[in-house]
Image (cartoon, helix red, strand yellow):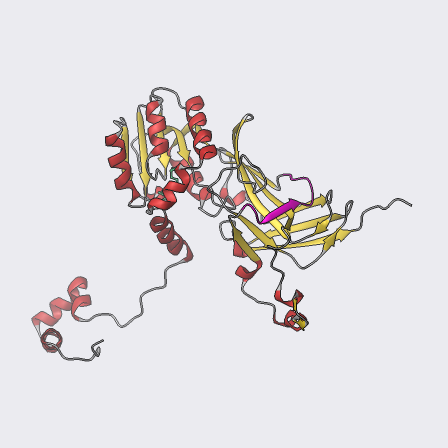
Amino acid sequence: MPSPFHRTPWTAFLESLRRVRGKLAAKLLFSERLNSWVYPSTEPAAEPTTDERYRDFNRSYFAQFYEQEKMLADKPRMDFYHAAIARHIKPGARVIDLGTGTGILAAFASRRGAARVYAIDHSVILEHAKTLAAHNRVENVEFISTHSKDLKLDAPVDVILHEQMGDYLFDEDMVVNITDLRDRLLKPGGLILPARFDLFCEPVKIRDGRFVPHIWDMNVHGIDYSCMDRERPQDPHYYHIPAADLGYVDYLLSEPSPVLTIDLQTLRAEDLPKEIRFTRTITRGGRFDGYVVYFRAMVDDDLALNSSPLDPGRATNWGYRILRTDREFLADGDVIAITLTIGNWPQVDTWRWKHVKSAGITSP
Ligand SMILES: C[S@@+](CC[C@H](N)C(=O)[O-])C[C@H]1O[C@@H](n2cnc3c(N)ncnc32)[C@H](O)[C@@H]1O
């Protein structure tokens, strides 16, 4: 690598420019563009914010064919959207497809007779969506390369269509993106598809042989790791595990029930709770390894999609999260009271969880 101080004809030229006095210097002083070119800033570039970093990640992640393939090959997901669109998009409707990807939901809407579908995406995948639409003779779709917050239309739409759910529902900024579009560009009485969601957070046992204990709970052929208890990591990432493998979860220790239900038709982002308290009565005792977090999306009472790792009919392309807990065994009838505290819903490393156990009632 050449030294940054190496003097080339170009740097010599810049140097001589810097030495110029009089008119040119004055002109440079008042021309921002020229000024920054001749006097390159020595200030380090501003660090991207967490939001900006996430957007860059999201854009490049969904540009990959493999990510789109997993979603398109997810039959429960595609059947759910196909049925939802067939039921709820009426001929003549004006629709926004937020995050169109390969354009599949926009194509379904168009085939239902939508008068206009604004298919928007901030990823370069949009170029392939255009090719696919032309190849399949999909009509009435306008592809717009933009982030949703910058979308402007002349008139509001009848339907906002989206698939913005992350593994733990909130991680793709669904709430902020949809409520922003809803408040600016959806007709009064307009529809969001899908709008209703349940979030689950269930005590779980991981399959024996797959379970990885905390290091301070380990003893490997007589080598005791318990002193590592004093070295517990401060990094919150350590305490949750992204998982996609269905063989990993053994069973739930209690009956699942939503810990949070939201309706995007009416929700205000600021109304999402910062703390959730719930209880679970243990119906199948065993080692309590943490909580499994997954979601359900609902369009009608008979039309839902869920990502529970224990449901054979689950949507296949979503993973789930395990929130790890300290080692503990729970018995049938035990009750645990759980408090889930949320710093920022889209960032699971801002979630904190704790529980208090009350022993089950044992027969005399
Ligand atoms: C989960 S994919 C869904 C793709 C497609 N709708 C489907 O169902 O197959 C989400 C898409 O939304 C895009 N996206 C996410 N947030 C966005 C935003 N705020 N504005 C525009 N596009 C966004 C991503 O680039 C990605 O292509």
Q: Nearer the viewer, residue 58 or 310?
A: 310
Task: Look at 12% across and 72% down and name the residue there.
Answer: 25
Q: Residue 87 at x, y = what percent?
A: 45, 22
Q: Is residue 321 shown left or right of residue 177?
A: right
Say left or right for 226 vs 121: right
Does the image show residue 189?
no
Which residues lie in the magenta part? 246-257
Residue 175 lies left or right of residue 308; in this view the side is left
Indicate left or right for 49 with 241 as reference. Answer: left
Residue 37 locus on image (x, y percent): 17, 67
- Say which residue appears at 44% left-offset and 23% top-offset: 88
Point out the image quarter for the N terminus.
Answer: bottom left
Ligand 1's quadrant is top left
Of residue 216 and residue 127, the one placed in the foreground of this image is 216
Question: In this figure, what is the number of numbered marks?
Answer: 0
**Position of 111 relative to 334 (above/below):** above
| Main secondary structure found in the magenta portion | loop
